[in-house]
Image: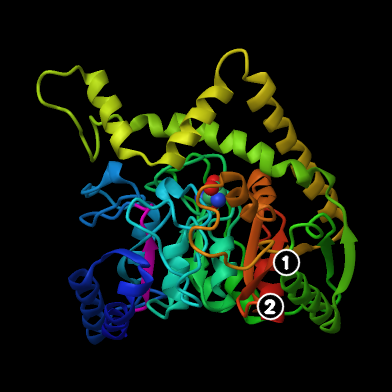
């Protein structure tokens, strides 16, 4: 199986560019180790021998980790992220590291310092972002499983536009230890796959308490695999988010979404319309909170500790070397966010910007709480449009940010959500994603509903 996937990567990845690094020898050695374990009659991990594409944001001992940035080019981490350790414990075969927007900032993978990834459905279009490499690897059959991270939609939006499945687990469900930080109160790793059950199997392997992450949830992981094996919505109350429709939503996306609503109704669900009035302010709040946290988190890239160092010729001060390295090592979007975040956190502006954004965050959490008093899950399209052409929004950050309109509220509130394919838009023949949102720690509901409509 590993050899077949490596051959597939060799055949198509020059065009798709899902991978930044393919660990051919390492993958074959892991696969052989599984075979040997089996021959010895030892107990195998739950995903023994299954190849996986790992987003290049998780540290991997002895394997490069770039976060899609020049600032970490050539850096080989001395340790494994908790997630990497768990994958290895499950006997997964790690094929390599996938392309991503630099520091996970973006919705198209065009912000990668190593060039864009193509959408396997149409290589001239974006595969979503920031985790475009992981989802493209699935859609191009280069890997059956992948890992992404979702700060504002970076698992779900790529899943939607590549016709694959992606889950943002409840915040704190998957350890962030060894996952390069972008916005710590929003960042969450999660599973990507081609089917709901595959995603559940991966979810179970990576979730669970970790004492190395202070925000890790110390509670049993919801029974996601059992839920995925027993898809059923009979008697379930499902809410359609009223605000996620209208101007800016592609007709074919709404058509496929509305058909999914009908399918759920036919399967026995009770459909109710739910209003979440604060959701229209989510994007604005996110683009203050995420850059603020990023401006603080990225201060560690000071040219002294990791990766790139520019101008260290013995004549310059440490401050100058730091400045020259950051100038050369960070791309435009990362710089934009650091400047925005530093501004929003500066004295005199803190209350007006960061403080207000935190209040909006509370309102959004309350909208969800009220909604989940009435329904078990909420549904919406995952993204307002299908995959757009590479380059179309590259110079227009506001247009790019709109790709995450429907995914961001979940990150701000910390609950769980899934995107799964619900057909192709008639006007362009490109995949459409259905989003299912559940309360925190009710991740199993995503799988129960997802498996029923899949
Ligand atoms: N597209 C959003 C951003 O640019 C979300 C990114 C993410 O989820 N990592 O911040």
Quarter of image, res 100: bottom left
Write the start and end of the magenta stretch as one range. Answer: 49-58
The residue at which mark 1 appears reads as 250
Crowding around mark 1 (Cα neighbors within 10 Å: few <14, some 14 to 19, many 20+) is some
Q: Earlier in the sequence, mark 1 or mark 2?
A: 1
Mark 1 and mark 2 residues within 8 Å of each other at the beta carbon: yes
Q: Is residue 215 positioned above or below 375 on the image?
A: above
Q: In percent of the image, x 83 and y 63: which residue is there?
A: 239
User: Residue 93: horizontal and vertical position, in percent?
Assistant: 31, 72
Judging from the image, what secondary structure is the residue with disc 2 in?
loop
Relative horizontal placement of residue 418, taking residue 123 as reference (left or right): right
Residue 324, x across and y down, in percent? 26, 28
Relative to 425, 325 lies left or right = left
Q: Quadrant of the N terminus?
A: bottom left
Reading the image, the residue beneath label 2 is 427
Where residue 70 appears, as percent x and y from the top left, is 29, 45
């Amino acid at each position: 199986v590993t050899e077949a996937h490596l051959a597939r990567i060799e055949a198509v990845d020059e065009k798709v560019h899902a991978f930044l690094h393919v660990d051919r020898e390492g993958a074959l050695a892991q696969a052989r180790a599984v075979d040997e374990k089996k021959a010895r009659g030892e107990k195998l991990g739950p995903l023994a021998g299954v190849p996986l594409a790992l987003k290049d944001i998780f540290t991997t001992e002895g394997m490069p980790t770039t976060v899609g940035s020049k600032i970490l080019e050539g850096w080989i981490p001395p340790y494994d992220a908790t997630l990497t350790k768990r994958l290895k414990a499950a006997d997964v075969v790690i094929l390599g590291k996938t392309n991503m927007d630099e520091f996970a900032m973006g919705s198209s993978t065009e912000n990668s310092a190593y060039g864009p990834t193509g959408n396997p459905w149409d290589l001239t279009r974006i595969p979503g972002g920031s985790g475009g490499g992981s989802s493209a690897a699935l859609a191009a059959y280069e890997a059956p499983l992948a890992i992404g991270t979702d700060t504002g939609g970076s698992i779900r939006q790529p899943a939607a536009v590549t016709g694959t499945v992606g889950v943002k687990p409840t915040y704190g469900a998957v350890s962030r230890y060894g996952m390069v930080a972008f916005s710590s109160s929003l960042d969450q790793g999660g599973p990507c796959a081609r089917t709901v059950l595959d995603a559940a199997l991966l979810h179970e392997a990576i979730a669970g308490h970790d004492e190395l992450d202070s925000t890790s949830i110390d509670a049993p992981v919801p029974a996601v695999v059992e839920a995925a094996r027993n898809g059923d919505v009979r008697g379930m109350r499902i809410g359609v988010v009223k605000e996620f429709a209208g101007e800016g939503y592609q007709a074919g996306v709404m058509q496929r979404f509305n058909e999914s609503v009908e399918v759920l109704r036919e399967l026995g669900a009770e459909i109710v319309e739910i209003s979440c009035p604060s959701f229209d302010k989510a994007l604005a709040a996110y683009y203050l909170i995420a850059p603020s946290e990023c401006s603080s988190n990225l201060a560690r890239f000071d040219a002294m500790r990791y990766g790139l160092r520019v101008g260290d010729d013995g004549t310059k001060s440490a401050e100058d070397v730091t400045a020259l390295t950051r100038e050369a090592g960070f791309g435009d979007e990362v710089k934009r966010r650091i400047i925005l975040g530093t501004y929003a956190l500066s004295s005199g502006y803190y209350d007006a910007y960061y403080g207000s954004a935190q209040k909006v965050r509370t309102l959004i959490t309350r909208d969800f709480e009220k909604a989940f008093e009435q329904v078990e899950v909420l549904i919406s399209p995952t993204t307002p449009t299908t995959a757009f052409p590479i380059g179309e929004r590259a110079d227009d950050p506001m247009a790019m940010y709109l790709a995450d309109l429907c995914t961001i509220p979940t990150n701000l509130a910390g609950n769980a959500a899934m995107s799964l394919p619900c057909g192709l838009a008639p006007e362009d023949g490109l995949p459409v994603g259905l989003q299912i949102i559940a309360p925190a720690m009710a991740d199993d509901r995503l799988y129960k509903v997802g498996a029923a409509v899949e």
